[in-house]
Image (cartoon, rainbow, N blue to C red):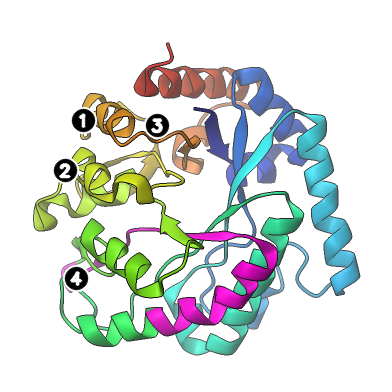
């Protein structure tokens, strides 16, 4: 099993070449490469996304250049993260779909087999309210992407989500339960769909779903092909390193990962909440510490 981390915060701070060099030196083998980001549906936001606005030829060169940098530094692009954001989808579903298709194409150019594409939490989808309407929207959205997945040999990894209720408490929504992820995979009926369990998201909704993080992993079983690992606490989707709050049972998580026979990358989806207070000269040590934690959780240290 390889140790992986997302690039976003580090790339913004140090540039891509230096980020990959630091990752490798710290003991990371792979990266969860962020292709775009959260989109609220405004033109100003989307224009800031990487190579948006370039020609197809320029985009091809751009992504092949990224792969070259990764290869040069011995970093595997193990998964990508496509554009996400319910507001963007609801305001402009046609452009959201177009950008998602481009992200699938980019995933292929990067030599990667998996892209994480969020399900859409449609308005009113909290707990199981408006379940059928939300389910239909997501089935239609994912089915539209299947020709691109087949063409570029890429798999969509479906991630569990959460939403705020009226009192700003985190509650379950689409795919918060592993059973719903498995239902989507079964109904879509294609090997091009799998699961990306976000361990922190499962922890945040556990009080309502009754699933422990390890229990959710065990239910998903062989459907798990990529992982988002990070720690959360109470009502905060903190995306920081394990053992920060003591809020998650990492021993049971590691046991569950081994029990289901998972052999993909153990990927940390951590960023600003972990790195932002470290001065530049201490970030490499912070990275090494995180890699050591990952190895301990998966039982390779």
Q: Can you tell which mark lies on residue 212?
A: 2
- Residue 193 highlighted magenta (yes or no): no
Q: What separation in Å lies between label 4 and label 3 (alpha carbons)? A: 26 Å
Mark 1 or 4: in front is 1
Name the element at disc 3.
loop
Graded by Cα atoms within 10 Å as few (under 14), some (14 to 19) or many (20 or more), the crowding at tag 2 reads many
Q: Do the residues labelled 2 and 1 touch (CB within 8 Å)?
A: yes
How many numbered markers are drawn?
4
Which of 150 and 166 lies nearest the eye of the viewer? 150
Q: Can you tell which mark lies on residue 249?
A: 1
Q: What stretch is highlighted in magenta?
A: 139-167
Q: What separation in Å lies between label 1 and label 4 (alpha carbons)? A: 26 Å
Name the element at disc 4.
loop
Residue 120 in view here: no
Q: What separation in Å lies between label 2 and label 4 (alpha carbons)? A: 21 Å
Question: Which one is earlier in the sequence, the residue at label 3 or at label 1?
Answer: 3
């Amino acid at each position: 099993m390889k140790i992986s981390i997302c690039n976003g915060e580090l790339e913004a701070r140090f540039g891509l070449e230096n980020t990959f060099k630091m990752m490798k030196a710290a003991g990371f083998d792979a990266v969860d490469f962020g292709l775009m980001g959260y989109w609220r549906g405004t033109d100003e936001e989307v224009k800031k996304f990487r190579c948006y606005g370039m020609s197809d030829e320029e985009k091809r060169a751009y992504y092949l250049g990224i792969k070259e940098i990764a290869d040069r530094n011995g970093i595997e692009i193990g998964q990508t993260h496509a554009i996400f954001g319910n507001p963007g989808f609801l305001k402009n579903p046609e452009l959201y779909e177009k950008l998602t298709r481009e992200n699938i194409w980019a995933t292929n150019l990067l030599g990667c087999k998996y892209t994480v594409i969020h399900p859409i939490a449609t308005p009113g989808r909290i707990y199981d309210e408006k379940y059928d309407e939300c389910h239909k929207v997501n089935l239609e959205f994912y089915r539209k992407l299947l020709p691109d997945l087949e063409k570029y040999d890429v798999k969509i990894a479906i991630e569990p989500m959460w939403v705020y209720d009226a009192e700003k408490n985190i509650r379950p929504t689409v795919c918060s339960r592993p059973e719903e992820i498995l239902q989507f995979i079964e109904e879509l009926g294609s090997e091009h769909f799998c699961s990306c369990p976000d361990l922190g998201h499962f922890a945040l909704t556990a009080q309502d779903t009754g699933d422990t993080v390890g229990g959710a992993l065990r239910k998903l079983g062989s459907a798990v092909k990529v992982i988002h690992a990070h720690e959360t606490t109470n009502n905060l989707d903190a995306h920081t390193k394990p053992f920060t709050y003591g809020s998650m049972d990492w021993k049971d998580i590691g046991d569950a990962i081994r029990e289901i026979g998972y052999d993909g990358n153990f990927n940390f989806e951590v960023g600003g909440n972990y790195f932002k207070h470290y001065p530049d000269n201490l970030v490499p040590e912070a990275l090494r510490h995180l890699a050591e934690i990952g190895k301990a959780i998966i039982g390779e240290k």
